[in-house]
Amino acid sequence: MFNVRIAEINLQMDVADEAFFAARLADYPPASGEPDMIIRSSIVENLSPPEGAMVEQVANADPAATTTTFLLRTADGRMGYATRGKSGAWLAIQTYTPDYSDVDIRILASRKHSVFSLTDFEYMYTGGMFSNRIAVTGGVVLHSSSIACRGVGVAFSANSGTGKSTQTGLWCDVFGDDVIMVNDDKPVLRFCDGEVTIHGNPWSGKTALNAPIGVPLKALVFLEQSLTNSIRRLGVADSLFQLTSQICRPFYDSAVGILTLDAIEKIINDVPVYMLSCDISREAVMTVYNEVFKDIIS
């Protein structure tokens, strides 16, 4: 069992692959008090929805999908998701309290996938539930690669494959030890003492690039590939469009969805949002640096 503090959340975790999570959580400090969230995750030989649970199928947009998702509501007031394979077997069941403070995840031991292992599923499910808990507490998890430079954070966001990690990697190359990788895939954005802060967490996508730090967020930078480098600040409408497409949120929880929209509005009001047209070069780094840090370097 792990008791750690991540992005100002005291998290208690009891997981199946303890070695994997021990490595991911090693740098995070011990919890500072009673848990704000408890996650129990296990690999089981037999799996079915809780007795008496109401089950509602969610239509799959892709007819070729190999799994079907169901929504659950248990007799004791818990909510949940259940995943069923084409064979009819239940592959994973996640239940949680409405505020995501208590989560139970069970994964079928015989589940097979061409890409993901059981540990991968455990990693994804626990990360998703942690993201939902962040949303309930008024923060968001942003699909982005983020760094800390000069004591403040810059997050680079875009669709997968656009070059987020490439840009943060270039910053590390250009500025060396002056740059810390906050999180390579899903940093946490929260509000601390009236300002937006960005935090590392152990759910960082395919890489283990993350740090147990939190710093004020200085800028959000969305990316588009280009042969030349330029940056422009986005207005409210464009900022809203870009942010809502990259924020992690529970798809079937309207109440938390509204909280997420409130958080996005606060972020846009407090943090400048940019669009960077860029190639892969030092010039791309300096284009952002000269704009975002102009108040420091001028």
Image (tube, rainbow, N blue to C red):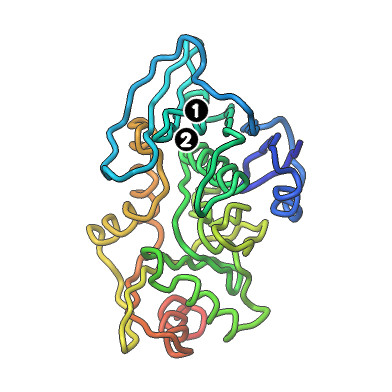
Instruction: State the image coordinates of residue 213 (x, y, percent, origin top left).
Output: 65, 58
Residue at x-position 36% and y-position 72%: 223
Task: Specify which label sits upstream in the sequence, 2 or 1.
Answer: 1
* SS at mark 2 in the image: helix
Q: Does residue 110 appear left or right of residue 55 in this picture?
A: right
In 3D space, how far apart are the residues under numbered discs 2 and 1 (Cα atoms)?
Answer: 6 Å
Residue 36 visible in the picture: no
Residue at x-position 47% and y-position 45%: 139
What's under tag 1, amino acid-wise? Asp
What's under tag 2, amino acid-wise? Val
Residue 35 visible in the picture: yes
Categorize mark 1 by other alpha carbons within 10 Å: few (<14), some (14-19), many (20+). Answer: some
* Disc number placed over residue 84 in the picture, else none: none
Q: Does residue 182 appear left or right of residue 228 in this picture?
A: right
* Disc number placed over residue 99 in the picture, else none: 1
Classify 215 as above or below 121.
below
Instruction: State the image coordinates of residue 32 (x, y, percent, origin top left).
Output: 74, 39
Residue 211 picture quarter: bottom right
* SS at mark 1 in the image: loop
The quarter of the image holding the N terminus is: top right
Classify 194 as above or below 34.
below
Categorize mark 2 by other alpha carbons within 10 Å: few (<14), some (14-19), many (20+). Answer: many
Residue toward you, 9 or 291: 9
Q: Are marks 2 and 1 in contact (CB under 8 Å)?
A: yes
For disc 2, the marked residue is 136
